[in-house]
Image (spheres, rainbow, N blue to C red):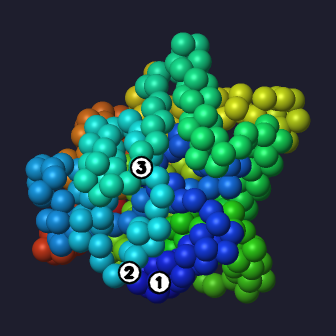
Amino acid sequence: MEHVELLSEFSINLKDRKEQENKKIVAFMSHDNIPEELLDAAGIIPLRMSFAGSDDLMSASNDYLPASTCSFAQTCIGLYSSKPHHYDFLNLVDYFMVSNHCVSDICASEIITKYFDIPRLNFYIPYTLNSEALQYYKNELLELKKQLEIIIGREILNEDILKSIKKYNQFKKKLSEVQELSILGSQKLEIFQKAILYGPSYLNELEDIINKSKSDPVKVNNIKFDLIFTGCSMFIGDYLINLIEDSGGNIILFDTWIGHSYYSQVFLDEELERIQDPLELLVARFKNNELGDHSVSNFLENKVLQLKNLIDEHEQKTGKKVGVINHIIKFCDHINIFQTFLKERLQEKGIRFLNLERDYSRANRGQLSTRIEAFMEMMG
């Protein structure tokens, strides 16, 4: 599905849900550690800002932030500043959540709430995983719960939170099955993007897609190289996936917020039965998220080990070498800081690795294509 069609369809769907079900909408910049289950339990629709940018959207943000700001943050501001037609659903947003995943997240979210007159919710995360940090995260969950209860005018019951946790857990488990389908990486990415945009309401359609693909598998042709894609996500409307596949590469795993980093965060059945306080489940998930790209102890060592294990498993299974593309949105200091360490450690292990830094400018397509093609030649 072309992204324009997807956005048009989503706009109609969101408008209908808001009007017919009288639901509020809370938007936030897409990354992990935002407890969407808590929003869902309050009867609120979580809306992840998961949209790729363009020259126009980045330029539209320059009245608010300098051009040396993360291109994704610029895009989020640009969407509210220029209000492109296919993003009409952003006018339906009732609240915008300000969080501290990175500096650009804070700046962009605060600007959107201040200059575009959208009420603000706050949810801050710690950057470590010690006992004090976990208590801090629990306190933030309690504070967010209070903020939501004021909005909806009623208490959010534990049974409703647990119901939402189980619903999202089932959704993520089903989404993980997409990884095993015999389809191109671009098709998997399209499914992930739509699923994360719609949330669990996409479950039935997701099941149909999976069942159809399993019953009638399609052989993937004209692919020379298998790749793992890590770093910054590829958001809706991004052309980068086309450049990769046109160069003969196929992404076998999206190790990003839109992909493995999202659907891998599930609870075991015994956890759901054992832990009585649903907020403690959310704290446990935060504690176990050792591969999330926030600054926790040993994050980079864990990431190197994870990628090495995934590559070894795939090569043993298929006999094909795997390369890694580390996607860095320009001026994303959060991912940029890690790029040298990640490259050196993986290359030490004999893994072919490309740090690919870029913004959303169309003028860069030729340069990006050349770099990707050179990387593919090196893999050959």
Check residue 119 in the rendering and tell me which mark sits there, or answer none. 3
Residue 268, numbered circle: none
Question: Residue 167's quadrant in the figure?
Answer: bottom right
- Tell me if I can see residue 347 in this picture: no
Q: Amino acid at mark 1?
A: Ser
Q: Position of residue 350 (x, y in %)?
A: 38, 43
Nearest to viewer (mark 2 / mark 3): 3
Q: Earlier in the sequence, mark 1 or mark 3?
A: 1
Which residue is denoted by mark 2 in the rendering?
A: 86
Question: Where on the picture, by quarter, is residue 188?
Answer: bottom right
Q: Residue at x 71, y 28 (%)?
A: 280
Q: How many marks?
A: 3
* Pick the front one: 332 or 255: 332
Q: Which residue is mark 1?
A: 8
Q: Residue at x 61, y 74 (%)?
A: 19
Residue 72 image offset from top left, x and y in percent: 29, 56
- Which quadrant, please, contains the C terminus? bottom left
If you read the primary sequence from the N terminus, does the residue marked by circle 2 or circle 3 appear first? 2
Name the kind of residue labelled 3 in the image.
Pro
Tell me the CA gap for discs 2 and 3: 23 Å
Question: How far across and down, in percent of the image, does residue 74 sit?
Answer: 23, 57
Question: Does residue 79 sit above or below 15 in this rendering?
Answer: above
Q: Nearer the viewer, residue 29 or 354?
A: 29
Q: Is label 3 in a helix, a strand or a loop?
A: loop
The Cα–Cα distance between marks 1 and 3, rounded to whole angstroms, is 25 Å
Instruction: Give the mark nearer the N terminus: 2 vs 1.
Output: 1
**Residue at 59% over, 70% down:** 18
**Of the residues shown, which amino acid type is indicated by label 2?**
His
Q: Tell whether 159 sits left or right of 98.
A: right
Residue 271 horizontal side relative to residue 299, left or right: right
